[in-house]
Image (cartoon, helix red, strand yellow):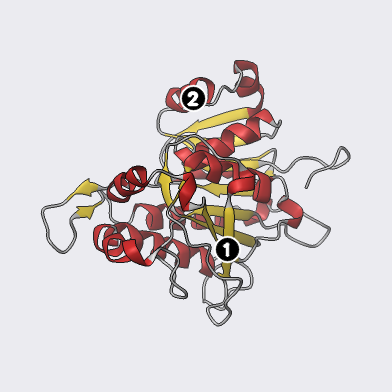
Amino acid sequence: MTTPTTPKPTLAFFGGTGGCAGAALALSLKAGYTVHALARTPSKLSKFMSETHGVPDETLNSHLHIIEGSVSDTQAVRNVLLIEGTVASVVVFGIGSYPKFNKSLLTPFTLDDPHVCAGAMRAVVEAVDGLKCYLRGEVGRERKPLLVTISTTGVTRKTRDVPAVVLPMYHYFLRVMHDDKREMEDILEAATVGSKREGKKPFGRSVVVRPSLLTDGEPKGLEKVRVGWEVHADESKEGQGPAVGYAISRADVGAWIFAEVIEKEASTPWAGKAVRTRIPVYETEMWEVLTMALMA
C-alpha cells in the first residue's frame, strides 16, 4: 500500500474497455495513478471512462496515456509497458472476447480466435522480457513487475470451484473459452519468478483472478465479496480452497483488483495465488445467473 512518502506504482492496462479491467482502471485514475493503456480505438476507451465510470476529463488528460494499437503490435505493447523510463510496476491483463454460437454439438459456443487470451498473454510476456534492460530497482537488482490477470472459474486442475448443479452446462457450453483461459494461465505461470516450468521469467509476481459468472449488475461492495484461493505457481500445493458461488458483478471484480492488488502492490498477499471471487447466491437473481451462463 502506498503512503504519502512513497510514490504510487505505475500501471499498464491491457483490455481496459472490458467490464472488470475497466472498473479497476477507473478507480486507479480517480486515485491519481499514472496509467498507460492499450486500445484499438482510443476515443472508445476515453468515452467509456468518462461516460460509464464518471472519470473527469482533467483526470483523463493528466493521468491516462492511451496507446493506439492491438496486442499483436509489438511496439505498441512496449509503449504501454514503458512508463517514465522504466517498466510499469503493475500490469493489469483483462483481454478477452465474447463467445459466438457455433454449429457444432461438441462446441456449441466458440470464439473468433480460440486462443485470444493465450496469444495476447504470450505477446505481453515477450514484450516485457524484451524490455528487461529498463527494469530498475535497488542497485544491482531488477524490479520485475507484478501482473494480475482476469481468468474464470472452471479451469482449475484442483478442487471444483463451481456449483455442482451448473457444472455439466458450464463445461459443455464454455469449453473453448476455458481451454483458452487455461492456456493463458499456464503461459503466465511459466513467466513468473518461482515457477518450476521452463521459460523466461519477466514477472516478479503474478495474481490470477478467477471470478464466478460475470454480470453487469450493480456492485454489492467489497464487504459482500467472498474469496478463496489456491497456489497457482505450484500444482503440488493446495491453498485455502475455492469460494464456490454462482455470480459476481464486473464492477465488484474491478474494485477487488484495485483494492487488493493495485493499492497493496508492494505487499499484496495474493501474489502467487489463483483467487476465486464470488457474491453469495442470494445476492444475485437466479434468472440473471442462467442468462449469463449462456453469454459468459
Up the image or down, 152 lies above or below 194; here it is above
Determine whether the residue tagged by mark 1 lies in a helix, strand or loop.
strand
Earlier residue among tags 1 and 2: 2
Q: Is residue 17 above or below residue 229?
A: above
Q: Amino acid at mark 2?
A: Thr
Q: Residue at x 43, y 57 (%)?
A: 152
Position in image of residue 19 (x %, y %): 46, 38
Residue at mark 2 = 52
What residue is shown at x 62% (from left), y 45% (from top)?
Answer: 222
Where is residue 80? Give x, y as percent.
55, 40
Please identify, in this view, whether the residue under mark 1 or under mark 2 is nearer the observer: 1
Q: Which of these two is toward me, 126 or 182?
A: 182
Residue position marked by numbered label 1 in the rendering:
228
In this view, which residue lies farthest toward the bottom? 236
Residue placed furthest toward the top: 57
Q: Tell me if 38 is positioned left or right of 288 in this view.
A: right
For label 2, count other residues whose C-alpha is less than 10 Å away and answer few (under 14), some (14-19) or many (20+): few
Q: Residue shown at 52%/76% (left/top)?
A: 197
Image coords of residue 26 (percent x, y): 58, 32
